[in-house]
Amino acid sequence: MFNISKLLDEIKSSPYREIIVAAPHTGKIAFAGVEIGARVHGPQGRWKETPGTKLCTLERECNPKPVCAPENGEICQVHRELDGHFVEAGTPLVVLRHMLTRDEVQRIILQKTLYLFPAPERAKYYFTPEADKKIRASDARSVTVHNGMELFIMSRMKREVPLNYTGPDGVIYEVYFKYNKNLDAGSPLVGICPQDHLHIIQNLVMRVQTEWTET
Amino acid sequence: MDNNIEKYLQNLRERLIYLTDIFAGKHGDSAALLEEKLTAFAVRVRSGNCEDVYAELSTVEDLVAYVERRLEKTLTPMDRVRVVRHPQRVCLRDILENVYDNFTEVGGQDEHSLDPSMLIARAIITRRRGKKTYMQSVMVIGQEKGHGAEYRNGGSVKPWGNAKALQYMSVAETEGIPIHAYIFTPGSYPIEDYPGAAQQIARNIYNMAGLRVPVVVVISEGGSGGAEAIGLADRRLMLSHGYYSVISPEGAAAIEGRLKNGERATPELIEHCAANLNILAEDNLKFGYIDRIVQEPPLGARPWHFDFFRSLRQEVIRATDEVVISTRKIPVLRGLALARHRSPESDIDNLYIRWGLSAAAKARLVRRRQQKFLRLSRQAARDRRPFVTKTATAFFDWISKPWVIVKYDFYHKHQRQISTLMEEINNEIDMLKYRLLAPWRKLSRRLPSRTDNKARELTALSSWKEDGRSHRWNYISPRYKIDRTLTCPNSESYGCLDLWGPDLFAEFAGVCSHCGYHFPMEPEWYVNNVFDAGSVFEFNSEIEAGNPLGFPGFSELVARAKEKTGAKSGCMTFEARIDNIKMVVAMLMGTFRGGSVGAAEGYKFVEAAARAAKKRYPFLAYVHGTAGIRIQEGTHGVIQMPRCTVAVRRYIEAGGLYMVLYDTNSFAGPVASFLGCSPYQFAVRSSNIGFAGPGVIKETTGMDIPPKYHRSYRALSRGHIQGIWDRRQIRANIKQALLTIGGRNLYYR
């Protein structure tokens, strides 16, 4: 049994994710007037077609390439000592503090509270026709699963095999795969919530949606 | 208070609002004076202090009319733009109700239409000769801005609206009735949904160039491509307060001021552009792009100006009559009838001319229309050919005509029969030789050397010498000398590695070795690598781009472009060969002012089409890049759309093969006319094709467009183009296309 308030407090105590922007390849670094504490934005636009704030320029063989912020956030560290120097691939250049959004918090909490059933190998996954019918008729939470139940069809290279669910009994709370899209091995397929915990999880999601303030 | 007086007061108030709106804050004193007089009069009327209400009303009306007449003289070009855009301006439905005797809207009704901004109606004009009454039908086509402005889209027609117009033009052609087109559009709606804005306008212009019924156009607001979609006509009339322009003054200001991301141009800059684009009726009449001006009342026509409708009716009927009369064969009768019609005293309603045409008259009508457009705008290009060269060219043209007729229409016909006979004789001789030499072949097959050759051919490795890789390209981009790497724009999605410049611009021909993205190359690369070495012969290179409108600061820009590229205009026309297949090529160079098309480029394009027709060569339009019509040349530029399309249509109808190949970025006017009308259009990979760029679409429609909206693959899926070629395969593909698309009647055969 988990403690909702403790979980939320844990996230609230550090409500951000630190993103280390590293050099994608070797080259000479020239920082683009970014200061610690400055707010930067990630790719914008409906299709993320506008690149994020330029952090620095990495020049290799007379080919200057901008390095842009991958997410919205605040700059908390700039490796100024590298300015004008040649760096290797993977050298940290800037550290961003990305404040977690409501959806991100919800995702983190759900991953901690639900039982995540992983994909055994990289393949496309589908629900079995019975489960699929139920999901289409109402939603994923109407499907009750139990250990050893035939729940998925794993499709790879024209080879379709049934996949049995193994884990605790409960209902499907979250589906992490998409129709006709490949999923890597080890990635979660579904998040299962025991029937008696359902109202707690729903309560938790509600609290996140109402209490969490985005900056 | 008398209801009538209230109505008159309301009308005066609307006139005052109109006056204030169109001057946008100017002449505030006049407006204030009128406001004061009007308010005082209204107060007196309401309080019952007026002795003779109608007499006082007449005084106020006279005062308003006087102020309107006085301010009419001060109208600037931008004021006129505001006049045509004002909601009180006459619109097509007013014209249908007041100019024609009866009408039925076809092709949709009000908002229940494929595109409510394009209004089509069958209308009737009644005329008399003596006691007899004649009903004459016309097809009225035009953009509607009012009478349901909420669904009319401001007269900005969507591609399917233009398709509807074309459909009803064909109906009019089938029924043999004239077309009256009324242009009330700020421009076409620039979306690429099927059939595509550019593609549909190109189809419209191409078809109008050969319509076999009289077409009369009246221009009120003639915005670029939207206007041209229904604007190719035998007679073009223009309302005195209208404008006809390549681009809206705001659009021109955005380009002039190099504004980006929705920045607004200052009113001064917009006014400056409107004044320098020469968009007024008088300017266009002077240039010869319209035939007559229809005078409007002071400050422009509004729906209650019934005298204006009467004069418009007279003018459109007169224009239609003139077109019909001008197709008559006997010059004396034609001259007499035209003189009678052109007389200002003539009452057109009481003169009857049949508008039906015989088959021969229809052919003459189309020919005259085409010749009219081909003659336009030549004066706007600077032809620097020496007098001797011009005379010699004209002389050779003249003497070569009979020679060409003898060569292609007589000799080639018989030559085919002779060559067929010769082929048959040769076949027989070959068969005879084969039989006679059979014993020798039997003997030679047994010789040892022959077996050795066969064995070597089957077992040895292919030789690098024959591969020809070391001399693959005749021309290499000068950028290969720069020691640097470049990043492929697709590297984010496909993970392309950086490319080393000397490799990329030399051996790789500017193609990313990982994803196949095509970096833009210089026009010279194509000239030297696509065609046979030494086969390129440029002509008309002396025709120069200039600044025909005297647009401030533009002469320097053109001079700079000439110096940078070494070319005198954005269009290079030349004859060339691919494996000895001769062809005429017109190349729009993206390096010269973005490949924009002005009077000089249009002139060269028309000449190239004529040359291809004369020499019976296929005609290839290679678009290295074009940003559209050159806005600084105003209507001299926009007239190239119908003009060059007419040239292309004449060439195709004479049996020529016209092919278009797009590269890099091709947008706007040229794509929406003489390029887009080709039945065979191809594109080079990574090219973009469209009507308006993303910024313009965002500004005019408010829509965000996806990043790959203009990619050639979308144009291919839409049916705009027929194929996408790799740059390294252009030569082979052109040859393949010429050999397969070209039928037996094509010139190059």
Image (cartoon, helix red, strand yellow):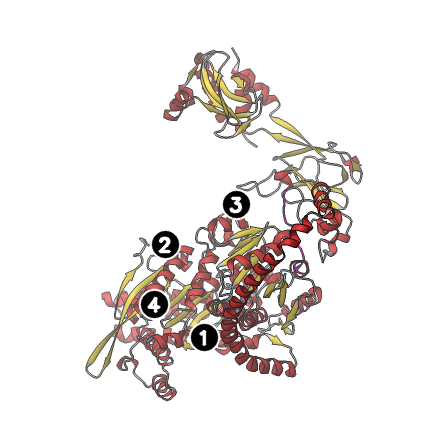
Residue under label 3, please give it: B706
Q: Position of residue A203 (x, y in %)?
A: 46, 19
Residue at image location 46% in from the left, 66% down from the top: B81
Residue at image location 78% in from the left, 35% down from the top: A87
Going by the numbered disc 3, the residue's amino acid type is: Pro
Residue under label 4, please give it: B173
- For marks 1 and 3, the one nearer the N-term is 1
Crowd around label 1: few <14 · some 14–19 · many ≥20 (10 Å) = many
Q: State which region is magenta.
A: B515-526
Going by the numbered disc 2, the residue's amino acid type is: Glu
Q: Which of the two marks, 4 or 1, is nearer to us in this view? A: 4
Q: Are marks 2 and 4 on the same chain?
A: yes
Residue under label 2, please give it: B150
Q: Looking at the rendering, which quadrant does residue B589 occupy?
A: bottom right
Asked if the residues shown at circle 1 and circle 3 are in contact, with their CB atoms under 8 angstroms apart, the answer is: no
Q: Which of the two marks, 2 or 4, is nearer to us in this view? A: 4
